Each structure stands twice: as structure tokens, then as C-alpha cells.
């Protein structure tokens, strides 16, 4: 008997396949792909667009304003769903696709699944060179889409319709794998998209996916527990992988059983609520005095679900040089960093096994009490830092106001610039999994786009909660068009625009390294004869949002209440001081390249001072 087949174009087959992929989450089946973001051009509208139209109910397509922001939104959607679901992005050949490069890099750095379905030049080459084709004189197969290879976990160019029978499952398997998780890229030549093939019917049968949980090796667990039992000053670093593994309960149980103090990375913020007695605060360059103080003394450090990037490790000066790391991670690459004792496996399984094997061990009470006392002191600093009073408007005050008035399940989104540090240090977590500070790739422009993607995901499960975005004026100017997207799609956000007159946090770094303010704040740009402030309220209102400008944090509190009551995206604008009001405590050293030779005495002195901390740097591989 002949095998049943469907005659479909490549594009039709891709979309039909995606529409039949499901995942089981908490006993409920739902589509693995939540839909997509798209901007059509000649490289994807005629074939992929036709296929998407036929599946617009199962795979809703959100019209983007910018390909890069579409990628940011897809990444934030995945993050909100704890990497259990993904969105695709489709872009036309040429600049439409190349605009996705930065967002692919963000997804790669943050280990987030995102599928890119991008136009490519004609496989036959009959019309070459075509509009928007980047010609390579020595290799005609080499084009713009090849630039995605370093920022994709899976990359393929579809040169025949039959290829997708192998490539699509491989791409999905990569995106859903806890170790290899990240963006997948499929280059779709314009002619191949429309070519037909007799696809076997079983290729389109419903498939229910489950995310693999890697069981740690017994010997690695035993080695880790043996090391832990020698600890007199143990510490747990909780990273974003704890949430992706849905291991918050296991982390909490392990910490409570052993009474080991817990510190959080930027990605791991909201693993524990602020009031948990073992939550000692955020660690690292943008961390807390409490977490960094115990990190300096800890002798055994259990790092769970973190890639130990420099903002967590203080460029590897935050710890004693002889501290023993035990790294629990699903990815071998991350588990083996810096002479760590690796436990390669799922965080949920590993923490359960560690807890069982370490039964009877407890952190010395004096050590835990010391850590808790330091956290009390840090909380007092944060209270003072966020308090309203007779001082200039600051990020910290705005954060404090919103923190006080928001719902515990509202989601907070921030990204590159000064706000990640200020949110990480000053935000008191009210409920687990409610903070998204994008600092993996430190990408300006993620804030509003990411807020839109997060809100799309949030609305699927918690439609009565809000997505709150903190964004500076610099990042707002870089990418703001998804205010319009959110209004069009009726995905409400509350956006706090904090205007400090330029790129103030980089100006602060410039000044801290002895340099004069130059080309960061608008007033310090020699090419700007007469600086003026953007009317952010009017700009946001022109895109359909409700908007208002407030003079101070007290007025922001009243505006935030109005924003909560609103049924559409609401933008609150407030000026903050570019020099005063920064969080000055809680910072570890951070390696920054400074001039070794200079005629500037201040720069020379700053270089000497900066390098003085290098002696604490832990050497590793």
C-alpha cells in the first residue's frame, strides 16, 4: 500500500509542521510554538506569507515594526514561558534578515529558544544578482545569512524541499534541549520556498514534546557532597537556570535543609522572594554588599544554573582564590568553568539528589547568622536609597515607588544601561519568576520590545497582571516602536521612561576612569550646539499610548495608580539626575580596559587605582 502523502510547498510544509507540535506543561497540552513575529518583504511574503495566512488561527502572526525588536520580543516570550515555548520570527532576504543578528545574539547569550525563518537568495541563481543580495566574489554560496552561524545553536539553508523532514525536527530538538538551548536559523531561498514535494503524511502528525531532564552522574553527586561536607562557609549562587528547570522549590528546600545562604545572579533574580531568611541578595558588579561580603569568605560555592559571567563573578575577584566551586548545570560547557567540580544535569534532579546525599550536613549557624545580619544591613541601605526626600530624582526612587505599588505577580522588565544595576540592587522580589533583567548580552532596546513579548506570554496565563518596563531615554530613543505594537495588539504595558539626558551610566564609567564627560550626555556632545529634551509624553501618545509626565517620584506614585487602572499601554515620563542618586554600594570590581599610557593625570591615577584590585583576580580557564 502506498504511503499517504501531501503535495505541499516547502513553506506550507514548514508551517503545517509547526502547527502540529505541542508541549505538555503542568498536565496541559498547548502548542509548542506560540506564533510568530513577522515583517514581510519580497523574500518571504509570497510563499511563507501564503502559508502563514492559512494557519493564522493556530499560529498568530504579530506584525513587527523592526526585525531586531521582533527578535527581542520572541526572546522575552520564551523567557516568560521558562523556555518551554517559543515564537518564530520571519524576515525578508537582505537587511530584513540581517536586522535579526543582534536579537539572535541576545537569545544565544541567554540560552533562549527562537526560530528564525528568513528569506535567502535564489538557489538557481538564474536572476543573480538580485535586490538586497550581498555578493561574495570568491564564494557564491556565502551570503548575509551565513553571519548567523556564530549566533545560532542550529543553522541550515534549505536547498531542497525534502530537507525540512530532517531539519525541522533537529531545529526543534535543539531549541528544546536544556544543554543546547538557543536560537535556530533556517535560511529559505525564495525559489525553494515555493517548490513542491510529496511529504509523507506522518510528518505532520501531532507530536507532544517534553523537555528532557538530564540525570546527574552518581559519582559527580558523590564528589560534590563530599566537598560540601567539608565546608565551613558554604554559599549557593542561584542563576536563571533554576527557574528554567522549574527548580525553585528544590532550591529552597535544599537551602532550608542545609541552612546555606543563597545569593542570586542577575538572571536568577526572583528565584527567592526578598523576605526569605536565606536570601542574602544579588551578587556581583551590580549586586549587594551582603552577597558580595559572604562571597569573599565562602570556601565552598554551589553554583546552580549560572554561566558565571563577569558581572556575577566581579571579573573573578569576588571570591577567595582557593574557594571550591561545585557547578550544577545542564550544559557541560557551563558546568566545567573555572576549575569547578561539575555536576552535569538538570537542576531540579541535581538539587534533590544533593539534598538527599547531604542529609545531616548543615552550615555552621554562626556563618548563616552572619550572612543574615549582612542582609538586614543591606535592606536598610535599600530603604534609604529608594526613600523619597530632599534629593534629586533617581532611578532608585522610581524603582521603589513602583515596587511598593505593583502586584506581586506583575512582571518587571529592564535591560542595558543604568537600570539593570539599579533594578537588580533595589528591587525587592515579591514573588518568584517576576523579574526579567536582560544582562546576558546587555542589549539596549530590549526593554520595550521585550516587554511586548513578555506581555504576549503573560496574557496567555495571567491576563490580569501587568508587565512593567523600566527604560532610560537612551534606550527609548534606540527602540521604541513596540509601544505602537502593544497598542495595536492590545497587549498593555506600563512603561516608566526615566530621562537623564543621554547615556548617563556610560558617562559615569567615563568619569570613574578619569576621563572627562564626552559624547554621552547630550550636553557634552561637541557636535550638538543646542541640546534639547525629547517630549517623550507626546511621542508615546502619538503611537496611541496613554502618557503623562511627572515631576517627581511622589507624582509617579499617583501616575502609576492611573496606569494600573488603564486598559491600554501607559507611559510615565520623569527626569532623573545623571550624576546624583546612583546606588553607590554593593559593587564588586569589574575588569575594564583603561589606558596604560596617557598624558592625563586623572586617567593615569584612575588606571593605577583600577588595577590595584587585580591581585584578587582568580585565574582559571
Image (spheres, rainbow, N blue to C red):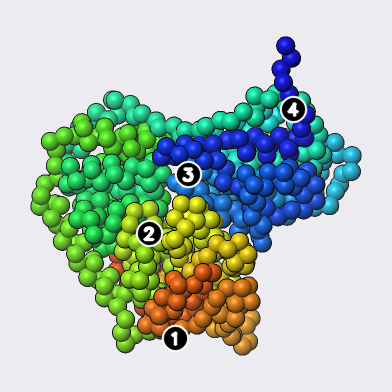
**Mark closest to the chain's N terminus, 4 or 2:** 4
Task: Please tell me whether mark 2 or mark 1 is closer to you in this view.
Answer: 2
Q: Which mark is residue 6?
A: 4
The mark that comes first in sequence, 3 or 4, is 4
**Residues marked 3 and 2 touching at CB (< 8 Å):** no
* Residue sitting at x 55%, y 40%: 31
Mark 1 and mark 4 lie on one chain; the one further toward the N terminus is: 4
Q: Residue at x 53, y 56 (%)?
A: 456
Residue 127 picture location, percent across and down? 89, 43
Q: Which residue is mark 2?
A: 409
Q: Are marks 3 and 4 in contact (CB under 8 Å)?
A: no
Q: Callout 4: helix, strand or loop?
A: strand
Helix, strand or loop at disc 3? loop
Between the C-alphas of marks 3 and 2, the distance is 19 Å
Q: To which residue does mark 1 refer?
A: 551
Q: Please determine whether, in this image, residue 152 is positioned above or below residue 160.
A: below
Residue ID at (39%, 57%): 434
Could you give the CA–CA distance between mark 4 and mark 2, rounded to whole angstroms? 46 Å
Which image quadrant: the N terminus? top right
| Marked residue nearer the N-terminal end (2 or 1) | 2
State the quadrant of the C terminus.
Answer: top left
- Mark 2 or mark 3, which is nearer the start of the sequence? 3
What label sits on residue 83 in the rendered view? 3
Whether residue 197 sits left or right of residue 412 in the image: it is right
Q: Is residue 201 left or right of residue 520?
A: right
Residue 272 versus residue 510 in the image, above or below: above
Q: Residues under labels 1 and 4: Cα distance?
A: 63 Å
Residue 619, horizontal then vertical, whole percent: 35, 46
Q: Is residue 438 visible?
A: no
Amino acid at each position: 500500500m502506498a504511503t499517504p502523502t501531501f503535495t505541499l510547498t516547502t513553506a506550507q510544509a514548514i508551517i503545517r509542521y509547526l502547527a502540529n507540535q505541542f508541549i505538555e506543561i503542568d498536565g496541559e497540552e498547548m502548542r509548542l510554538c506560540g506564533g510568530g513575529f513577522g515583517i514581510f518583504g519580497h523574500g518571504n511574503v509570497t510563499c511563507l506569507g501564503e502559508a502563514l495566512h492559512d494557519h493564522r488561527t493556530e499560529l498568530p502572526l504579530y506584525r513587527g515594526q523592526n526585525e531586531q525588536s521582533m527578535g527581542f520580543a520572541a526572546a522575552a516570550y520564551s523567557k516568560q514561558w521558562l523556555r518551554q515555548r517559543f515564537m518564530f520570527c520571519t524576515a525578508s532576504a537582505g537587511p530584513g534578515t540581517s536586522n535579526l543578528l543582534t536579537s539572535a545574539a541576545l537569545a544565544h547569550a541567554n540560552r533562549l529558544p527562537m526560530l528564525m525563518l528568513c528569506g535567502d537568495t535564489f538557489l538557481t541563481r538564474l536572476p543573480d544578482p538580485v535586490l538586497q543580495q550581498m555578493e561574495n566574489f570568491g564564494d557564491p554560496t556565502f551570503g548575509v545569512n551565513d553571519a548567523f552561524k556564530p549566533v545560532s545553536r542550529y543553522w541550515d539553508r534549505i536547498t531542497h524541499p525534502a530537507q525540512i523532514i530532517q531539519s525541522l525536527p533537529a531545529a526543534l530538538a535543539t531549541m528544546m534541549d536544556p544543554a543546547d538551548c538557543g536560537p535556530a536559523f533556517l535560511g529559505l531561498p525564495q525559489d525553494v520556498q515555493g517548490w513542491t514535494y510529496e511529504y509523507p503524511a506522518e510528518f505532520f502528525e501531532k507530536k507532544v514534546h517534553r523537555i528532557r531532564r538530564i540525570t546527574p552522574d552518581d559519582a559527580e553527586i558523590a564528589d560534590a557532597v563530599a566537598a560540601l561536607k567539608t565546608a565551613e562557609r558554604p554559599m549557593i549562587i542561584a542563576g536563571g537556570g533554576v527557574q528554567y528547570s522549574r527548580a525553585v522549590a528544590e532550591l529552597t528546600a535544599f537551602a532550608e535543609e542545609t541552612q546555606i545562604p543563597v545569593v542570586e545572579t542577575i538572571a536568577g533574580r526572583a528565584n527567592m522572594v526578598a523576605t526569605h531568611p536565606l536570601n542574602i541578595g544579588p551578587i556581583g558588579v551590580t549586586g549587594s554588599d551582603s552577597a558580595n561580603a559572604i562571597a569573599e569568605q565562602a570556601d565552598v560555592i554551589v553554583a546552580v544554573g549560572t554561566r558565571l559571567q563577569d558581572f556575577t563573578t566581579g571579573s573573578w575577584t569576588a571570591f577567595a582564590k582557593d574557594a571550591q566551586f561545585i557547578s550544577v548545570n545542564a550544559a557541560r560547557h557551563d558546568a566545567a568553568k573555572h576549575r569547578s567540580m561539575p555536576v552535569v544535569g538538570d537542576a531540579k534532579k541535581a538539587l534533590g539528589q544533593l539534598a538527599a546525599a547531604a542529609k545531616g550536613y548543615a552550615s555552621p549557624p554562626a556563618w548563616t547568622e552572619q550572612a543574615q545580619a549582612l542582609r538586614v544591613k543591606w535592606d536598610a541601605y535599600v530603604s534609604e536609597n529608594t526613600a523619597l526626600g530632599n534629593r534629586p530624582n533617581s532611578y532608585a526612587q522610581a524603582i521603589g515607588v513602583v515596587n511598593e505599588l505593583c502586584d506581586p505577580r506583575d512582571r518587571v522588565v529592564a535591560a542595558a544601561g543604568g537600570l539593570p544595576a539599579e533594578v537588580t540592587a533595589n528591587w525587592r522580589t515579591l514573588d518568584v519568576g517576576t523579574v526579567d533583567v536582560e544582562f546576558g548580552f546587555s542589549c539596549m532596546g530590549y526593554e520595550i520590545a521585550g516587554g511586548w513579548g513578555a506581555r504576549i506570554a503573560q496574557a496567555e496565563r495571567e491576563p490580569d497582571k501587568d508587565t512593567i518596563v523600566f527604560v532610560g531615554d537612551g534606550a527609548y530613543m534606540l527602540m521604541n516602536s513596540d509601544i505602537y505594537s502593544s497598542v495595536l495588539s492590545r497587549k498593555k504595558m506600563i512603561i516608566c521612561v526615566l530621562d537623564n539626558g543621554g547615556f548617563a551610566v556610560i558617562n559615569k564609567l567615563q568619569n570613574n576612569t578619569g576621563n572627562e564627560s564626552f559624547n554621552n550626555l547630550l550636553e557634552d556632545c561637541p557636535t550638538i550646539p543646542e541640546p534639547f529634551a525629547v517630549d517623550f509624553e507626546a511621542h508615546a501618545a502619538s503611537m496611541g499610548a496613554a502618557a503623562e509626565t511627572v515631576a517627581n517620584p511622589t507624582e509617579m506614585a499617583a501616575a502609576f495608580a492611573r496606569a494600573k487602572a488603564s486598559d491600554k499601554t501607559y507611559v510615565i515620563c520623569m527626569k532623573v539626575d545623571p550624576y546624583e542618586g546612583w546606588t553607590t554600594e554593593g559593587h564588586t570590581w569589574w575588569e575594564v580596559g583603561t589606558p596604560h599610557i596617557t598624558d592625563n593625570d586623572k586617567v593615569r591615577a584612575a588606571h593605577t587605582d583600577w588595577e590595584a584590585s587585580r591581585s584578587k583576580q582568580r585565574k582559571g580557564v
